[in-house]
Image (cartoon, helix red, strand yellow):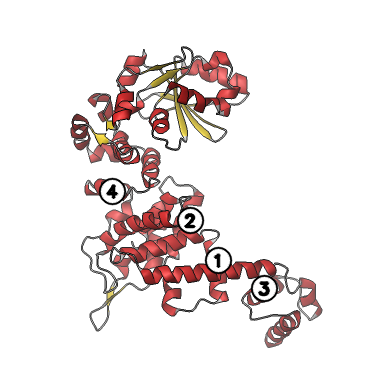
């Protein structure tokens, strides 16, 4: 294992550029060891040092950039930074390695490598637990000290396919949900994102939701009443359906080999039908309808996101998925995939076409908790036509008319001219205008009528 660790870190630019005298002050600890052993992707490196403040000063001086210390929720000072796309966390050793190991969460994360001594240190037999796939707490005191570790236990169990040791399981079961909700939202979401990004993680979501965790963090989900009947197109109530969409999104992520925005995509599955409760109506035949529920869902989630620690990009994608999640369903129902509908869909999704398609497929399969072959066949046809449309657009990249052409027939420079150019280009892409002559005739007709 030591050689595997050395080979890995030797490839990282930070360690290549770090002076030997500074490198020898460091110990590697934490998730690198199980990740390397189980051949899992590695996104961050945890390090410890005897004097973190002194090390920060030396680091800033050598690299000629600022490295900032921040305090975590337990009062520890952490040096956090990104170096060539790798995330680093450097903390201070707690007196000695034995005491430092005891304060950590699980033994699989309590293995150390010393650069100075070129040796592995394993005071709690963490490597044995890694090899036997056992998740064991380092100590009950330190596990209970940080409620976020409760979430982490579920993630590590699934991610590494581990068995939780009995005493550790009892400690996890005794965690207070109230204490978990007192944690900073940033830390909750950081751990939740890691869970959502595992595929499959539906079993974790189910287990956590039985304890009320998911609904407590994602507040709109907690507002859904249980057992609200839908219609003949759904076998489950709104709440159960929303959870099942998460499950089927994972299925289609694998089928389409998609993992770019997994957290947001699965979150959209949980929240896309939040507005159904407020829009439920019954017709004269006793059938339920939810007209416009996607708009209400959008507004509910938009309000919720105002206080949530997501990036602007993440919020935009989530709201787009929720607002437009019925678009493909309407196209399928009308069975009319035109160049106009393809252009509008392509413009609205802003590069997130696969996210919308996977949500659509997951939503359909979750209706009865089985694959919807009709929707799958529709998506195949839709993607083929969308590909043809994009190829046609690439051939027609040059505008069929210019502003000068419109000014020659009477248009004045300004907003109206810009709108007409846009409209003509849309009709050109949709195949309704095929030549410059037709474009000028259309523009003259509109000008005359106005």
Going from the N terminus, do you reach mark 3 or mark 4 first?
4
Q: Are marks 4 and 1 in contact (CB under 8 Å)?
A: no
Are the residues flagged by discs 4 and 2 in contact, CB closer than 8 Å?
no
Q: Is residue 110 above or below residue 84?
A: above
Mark sitting earlier along the chain (2/1) = 2
**Distance from Cα at disc 2 to Cα at disc 1:** 14 Å
Q: Which residue is mark 2?
A: 317
Q: Position of residue 376 (x, y in %)?
A: 41, 67
Q: Earlier in the sequence, mark 4 or mark 2?
A: 4
> Is the N terminus in the top left, top right, bottom left or bottom right quadrant?
top left
Separation of residues labelled 3 and 4 (CA atoms): 49 Å
x 39%, y 27%: residue: 30
Tag 1 residue: 346
Tag 1, which secondary structure?
A: helix
The residue tagged 3 is: 425
Q: Residues within 10 Å of mark 4 (few under 14, many from 20)?
A: few
Badge 3: how crowded within 10 Å, few (<14), some, or many (20+)?
A: many
Q: Is residue 13 left or right of residue 212?
A: right
């Amino acid at each position: 294992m030591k050689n595997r660790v050395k080979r890995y870190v030797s490839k990282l630019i930070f360690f290549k550029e770090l002076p030997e005298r500074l490198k020898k002050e460091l110990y590697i600890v934490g998730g690198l060891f199980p990740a390397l052993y189980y051949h899992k992707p590695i996104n961050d490196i945890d390090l410890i040092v005897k004097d973190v403040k002194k090390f920060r000063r030396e680091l800033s001086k050598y690299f000629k950039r600022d490295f900032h210390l921040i305090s975590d929720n337990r009062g520890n000072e952490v040096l956090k930074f990104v170096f060539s796309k790798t995330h680093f966390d450097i903390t201070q050793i707690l007196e000695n390695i034995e005491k430092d190991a005891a304060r950590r969460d699980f033994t699989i994360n309590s293995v150390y490598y010393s650069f100075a001594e070129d040796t592995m240190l394993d005071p709690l037999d963490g490597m044995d637990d890694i090899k036997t796939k056992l998740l064991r707490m380092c100590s009950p005191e330190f596990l209970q000290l940080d409620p976020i570790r409760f979430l982490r236990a579920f993630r590590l169990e699934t991610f590494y396919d581990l068995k939780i040791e009995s005493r550790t399981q009892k400690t996890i079961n005794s965690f207070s949900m109230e204490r978990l909700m007192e944690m900073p939202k940033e830390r909750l979401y950081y751990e939740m994102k890691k869970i959502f990004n595992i595929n499959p993680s539906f079993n974790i979501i189910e287990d956590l939701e039985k304890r009320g965790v998911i609904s407590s963090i994602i507040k709109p989900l907690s507002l859904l009443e249980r057992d609200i009947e839908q219609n003949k197109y759904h076998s489950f109530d709104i709440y159960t359906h929303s959870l099942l969409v998460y499950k089927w999104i994972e299925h289609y992520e694998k089928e389409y080999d998609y993992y770019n925005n997994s957290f947001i995509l699965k979150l959209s599955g949980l929240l896309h039908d939040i507005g159904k409760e407020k829009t439920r109506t019954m017709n004269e035949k006793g059938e339920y309808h939810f007209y416009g529920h996607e708009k209400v869902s959008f507004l509910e989630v938009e309000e919720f996101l105002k206080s949530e620690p997501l990036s602007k990009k993440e919020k935009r994608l989530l709201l787009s998925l929720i607002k437009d999640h019925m678009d493909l369903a309407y196209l399928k129902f009308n069975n009319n995939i035109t160049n106009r509908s393809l252009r509008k869909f392509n413009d609205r999704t802003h590069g997130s076409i696969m996210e919308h398609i996977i949500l659509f497929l997951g939503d359909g399969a979750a209706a009865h908790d089985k694959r919807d072959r009709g929707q799958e066949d529709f998506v195949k046809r839709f993607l083929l036509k969308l590909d043809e449309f994009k190829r046609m657009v690439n051939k027609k990249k040059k505008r069929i008319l210019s502003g000068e052409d419109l000014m020659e027939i009477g248009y004045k420079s300004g907003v109206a001219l810009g709108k007409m150019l846009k409209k003509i280009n849309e009709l050109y892409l949709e195949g309704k205008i095929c030549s410059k002559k037709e474009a000028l005739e259309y523009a003259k007709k509109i000008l005359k009528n106005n």
